[in-house]
Structure formats: C-alpha cells, structure tokens
Amino acid sequence: MDVVVLGLGVGGEEVAGRLAAAGLSVVGVERRLVGGECPYYACVPTKMMVRAADLLAEARRVDGMAGHADVRPDWTPVAHRIRAEATDNWNDQVAVDRLVGKGARFVRGDGRLVGPKRVAVTPADGSGERVYDAGTAVVLGAGTDPAAPPVPGLADTPYWTNRQAVEVTELPASLLILGGGPIGCEFAQIFARFGVRVTVLEAADRLLPGEEPESSALVAQALSDDGVEVRAGAKVEHVTYDWRGFTARTSAGELTGGRLLVATGRRTSLDALGIGAAGLDPASRLLPVDDHMRATDGLYAVGDVTEHGGYTHMAMYQADIAVRDILGEGGFTADYRAVPRVTFTDPEIGGVGLTEAQAHAAGLDVRVGTADLAASARGWIHKAGNAGLIKLVADHDRGVLVGATSAGPCGGEVLAALTLAVHAEVPLDRLASMITAYPTFHRTIPTALAALG
Ligand SMILES: Cc1cc2nc3c(=O)[nH]c(=O)nc-3n(C[C@H](O)[C@H](O)[C@H](O)COP(=O)(O)OP(=O)(O)OC[C@H]3O[C@@H](n4cnc5c(N)ncnc54)[C@H](O)[C@@H]3O)c2cc1C
Ligand SMILES: NC(=O)c1ccc[n+]([C@@H]2O[C@H](COP(=O)([O-])OP(=O)(O)OC[C@H]3O[C@@H](n4cnc5c(N)ncnc54)[C@H](O)[C@@H]3O)[C@@H](O)[C@H]2O)c1
C-alpha cells in the first residue's frame, strides 16, 4: 500500500482519486458518506435552498417594477430537489463507484492513526479491525462536525445542526438560531423567506463578526427586512425543550422557537484520530501544516482539519498541493494571502484577504476606499434589492490591495476581480487604469479605488 487517505470529504476524495488514477496503490477510509459535508449537508444543498429563497424574494420585488406577483412559498420542491438531485437521498454509491473506478480501494469504517504511517480501521460491516501500513504517506482529510456550546440544558434537547436543517421536509412555524456566522445567516434568510418566524442570537456584537462591520450592517438590515429578529451581543444562559418547543434564557430576555438550530462553529476530533501516534500534540484543535501540506514526516493533512480550512475551495486547493507533492510533480505551494470567501445571503457578502482591522493588526500602512453599490448606475437601475458596497483595503507602502469586500447582488461573482488583484498584487495605478464595462456592478470597484485615502 502506498497511501492511506483517512476521511473522504471534499479534500480526501480528491487526493485518493487522483493518486489512484496516477497509479499509486491507495486505500480510502470513510465512515459516513464519500464526498463529506459539502455535497450532503453543506454547500450544495444549502445553496439550492438559497436559490429557492432568492427566487421568492425576486418574485416579491415584481410589485412596483414589473406588474404584480402573488407568491405562495412551498418547501416541497426544495426538499425534493435536495433528495433527488443533490444527495441521492444521502446515498454515496455513485461517489464510491467513481473512486473505485479510478483504482482506489475503499473501506467504509472508522479509522485512526496507530503509528507513523499506520492506520487501523474498524469496518462498518462488523468485520474485524484491519491495519494498513502506508509505504509513502497517510493523508488526513477528516474534516469537522458541528460544535455546540456548553450551555446548561442544551445537550438534553433535540436541537438541529446544519444536518437536520438540510434534511427538513416540513418547516416549523418558528426557528431560534444560535450563532450569526455564515451558517446562521444563510439559514435565517432561507427559512424566513419561506414564512418561518426566525430569531438569531449572536454572541458577538454583530452578525458575521469575521467580516467588515459594513458587511455586518448590510446583512442585519437584509435579515430585518425579511422579518428576522436579530439579537447580537447576547449570551444564552440556559435552554429547555417541551411540547411547545424551545425556550432559551438569554442576557437579552427569554427567546422561543418551535425548533432550535445550533450554528456556533465546528469542531475537529484530532485526539480520537490518533495524531499522538504520529508524534503530534493530541490536544491540537487544528493541524499546522507546511506549504506542501505536510503535518509531519509522511503525514499530510488537507481541508478543515488544517489551520487554513473552512471552505470547500480550500480543501480542493490543498488537495491539489498534497497530490503534486506526493507524486513529486512540483509546482506552486500554499499561499493564503488571497483566500476568497462568500456568504450566500442576499446581498451576497464576498471577502478576500485581510479586513481593515486585520490589516491594521498586521502593522500595515492601511488605506481604505469604500463605495455604495446602490448609488452606482447599475445599482440605481437595479432598484429593488440593490443594497451593497465595495470596500478596498490597501497597503500604502507597497501600493497594492491586501483585502477587499464585494457585497451586493452577484457580490460573490464581482469578488473574482478583487481576488485577482490581491493574488497578483496588481499595482494600484495599474488597477485604476482598467476599463470596466458600463453599466455593471463591478464598475463600483474604480469608484472605491478613487476613494482610497
Ligand atoms: C451548512 C454549511 C454550508 C457550507 N457552505 C459552504 C459554501 O457555500 N462554500 C464553501 O466553500 N464551503 C462551505 N462550507 C464549508 C465546507 O463544507 C467545508 O469546508 C468542506 O466540506 C471541508 O471539506 P473536508 O474534506 O475538509 O471535510 P468534510 O467535508 O468534513 O469531510 C471529512 C470526512 O471525513 C470523514 N471522517 C472523519 N473522521 C473519520 C474517521 N475517523 N474515519 C473515517 N472517516 C472519517 C467524515 O465522515 C467526512 O465524510 C459549508 C459548511 C456548512 C456546515
Ligand atoms: N458560504 C460559505 O462559504 C459557508 C457557509 C456556511 C458555513 N461555512 C463554513 O462553515 C464553518 C462553520 O460556520 P459557522 O457559521 O457555524 O461558524 P462560525 O464560527 O463562522 O460562526 C459561528 C458564530 O456563532 C457565534 N457564537 C459562538 N458561540 C455562541 C453562543 N453560545 N451563542 C450565540 N452565538 C455564538 C460566534 O460569535 C460566530 O459568529 C465555517 O468554517 C464557515 O466558513 C461556509
């Protein structure tokens, strides 16, 4: 055996498939579904939900702009699409066949490191434990599970995580969401647009605390316009559940919901994965890796278990680097200066690189330029649903952008131009001389460039 891949999510499946296709002998170990969180419980089904919720919102904007539309939301086609088109009713046979078709051996079971380059697997079919020795490398791609805060009472309740929220077939009348990060905000808007009374409780003083404060304000306004009640800066002290639903005692008073969705982040289980047997600190929450994705001699890690995970595109990027390193192919190594991220609310919140606060914390000579998307020609034409902004964060010393935000309709698409600018370190004067088509949303980029202090 050349390589054992432990965890076949987005990152692990890519590594195992490509190495097997290149002729290496590969064992892939997965205890749940090949493909991991993204296709079954995360990116794909939630963006199908977003698409449906956005259709409702656009239809509600017909009045006053294109006639009149009566909109009657129905969750049935959304739940059906998630089952029939996205998850095959949470069956991964197609993915298993694809992997085996590339030449990998597949074992469904629970794996753990029991030595450097040695993995023990307890197969799901009840057969006895098997041990695999990897001649070349072990690759960890074990991802994360939803984390729940240690709130008294919470563990005794049937709360939802993203997994139950994706599986839902009948919507509750009301939903209380703990956490106003990307997961909390996306689900809040989706369910509110389908008529659920939603309350979001966020411990930090604003939604999306990892993004620019201007983005947080935009999302708070959008959620409020959709009827979501947002309580930021509030702490949950106790949770109970009875036949009426959930009651949360919080520093902002008592909050209730027919269902409770916990969206307060993710957790790894590196100790249970046996990283101590490879000489790594079992108490680590995330694995430090070098720019070839090596955690230690013969052990690689990709995706959410690493310090630079959190997104499917990062798991894919890191998988590519690990594969090329194992095959000795060379090429680029990991560079995290221009990592893009998009929260798929309406308006979409796109960000790349550093926020203004992070750039200051890095000791840079920071200049900031902001422009209102709604005030642009395209924003004015678009009218209903035109809220958004471009914010640029520049390093004045080097004359380049180190971060940017693109919020608005198509905010995630417009972000591509800004990602390119940060990634390629395009000089600001060269960027300012770029011609932008009229009347596009991305014409707000030169307006923000002109506003750079
Ligand atoms: C609701 C939600 C929405 C999201 N939306 C987006 C989005 O729009 N865009 C985006 O880029 N990212 C999004 N993400 C993040 C994205 O899903 C993750 O970054 C991505 O899935 C990480 O891939 P991974 O391969 O590292 O891990 P995972 O996808 O978590 O896969 C890890 C796999 O390892 C398996 N495993 C773990 N331990 C063991 C073991 N001991 N033995 C055997 N198998 C094991 C697990 O069963 C799992 O299948 C979202 C996440 C959530 C929760
Ligand atoms: N569009 C996307 O790319 C996308 C969408 C969803 C999720 N994701 C990824 O999935 C991961 C998890 O997302 P997430 O939103 O769960 O995590 P997160 O860590 O980004 O946000 C969790 C939020 O919960 C808050 N919180 C923590 N404890 C709390 C408590 N006790 N009460 C109230 N609020 C509390 C935090 O302040 C934070 O704002 C992230 O890595 C994210 O990047 C990505």
Image: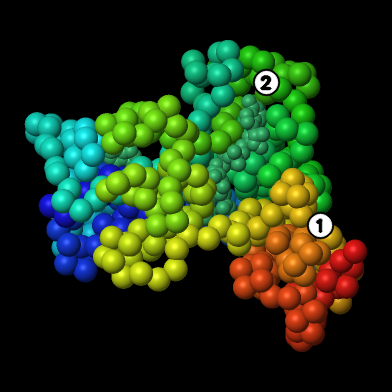
> Ligand 2 falls in which quarter?
top right
Q: Is residue 163 left or right of residue 322?
A: right
Residue beneath the point at 21% across and 33% down: 114
Residue 3 as seen in the image, left or right of residue 37: left
**First of labels 1, 2 by sequence position:** 2
Residue 49 drawn above or below residue 394 = above
Indicate whether 371 appears above or below 247.
below
Q: Could you tell me how far apart the alpha carbons at marks 1 and 2 are, in whole angstroms?
A: 37 Å
Residue type at mark 1? Val
Depth check: 344 or 451 in front?
451
Where is mark 2, residue-wise?
236
Percent x, y of residue 177: 63, 33
Residue 430, x across and y down, in percent: 75, 81
Residue located at (21% from left, 67% from top): 21
Going by the image, does 278 lie left or right of 231?
Answer: left
* Residue displayed at 82% across by 75% down: 446
The quarter in which the C terminus is drawn is: bottom right
**Which of label 1 and label 2 is nearer to you?**
1
Does the closest atom of ligand 2 sit within 8 Å of the Cβ of label 2? yes
Residue, disc 1: 366
Dot 1: within a 10 Å radius of its alpha carbon, few (fewer than 14), some, or many (20 or more) residues?
some
Between residues 283 and 412, which one lies in front from this camera angle?
A: 283
Answer above or below: position of 450 versus 365: below
Q: Are marks 1 and 2 in contact (CB under 8 Å)?
A: no
* Quadrant of the image occupied by residue 422: bottom right
Q: Secondary structure at mark 1?
A: strand
Residue 326 seen in the figure: yes
